[in-house]
Image: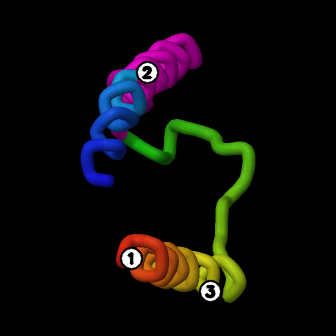
Amino acid sequence: MIWRIGIFALPLLAQAVRMSERVAMAMEARGLQGDAAASAKERSFYRDVSYGTLDIFIALAFPVSVFALLMIFAHP
């Protein structure tokens, strides 16, 4: 099963690098470079992102459920 993860790891890593390059180019195009990128006071944001109790619950429940499924299906 571990080797199956390796099959998907390299394409996912390559995709992540491509996406990060696109984000970097978009930030430069919007002027988020140099002093403007270093200081949050000079930038504007669309909205503040916050999280609530449901977000915390999902963040805790997801790894637990993945671990439980791996334990159930990994052992014959």
Helix, strand or loop for disc 3: helix
Horizontally, residue 74 falls left or right of residue 73, namely left
Q: For the residue marked with disc 1, what is the amino acid? A: Pro
Instruction: Give the number of marks.
Output: 3
Q: Position of residue 51 (x, y in %)?
A: 65, 74
Q: Magenta stretch?
A: 15-38
* Residue 57 lies in the magenta-colored region: no
Mark 2, residues whose alpha carbon is within 10 Å: few (<14), some, or many (≥20)?
some
Task: Give the label on residue 57, or none.
Answer: 3
Pick whichever of labels 2 and 3 is earlier in the sequence. 2
Task: Give the label on residue 24, or none.
Answer: 2
Residue name at image x 57 percent, y 84 percent:
61
Pick whichever of labels 1 and 2 is earlier in the sequence. 2
Q: Position of residue 46 (x, y in %)?
A: 73, 44
Mark 3, residues whose alpha carbon is within 10 Å: few (<14), some, or many (≥20)?
few
Helix, strand or loop for disc 2: helix
Q: Does 13 sit above or below residue 29?
A: below
Question: What is the C-alpha distance between the residues marked 1 and 2?
Answer: 46 Å
Question: What is the C-alpha distance between the residues marked 1 and 3?
Answer: 30 Å
Residue name at image x 34 percent, y 33 percent:
7
Q: Which residue is mark 1?
A: 76
Mark 1, residues whose alpha carbon is within 10 Å: few (<14), some, or many (≥20)?
few
Residue name at image x 26 percent, y 44 percent:
3
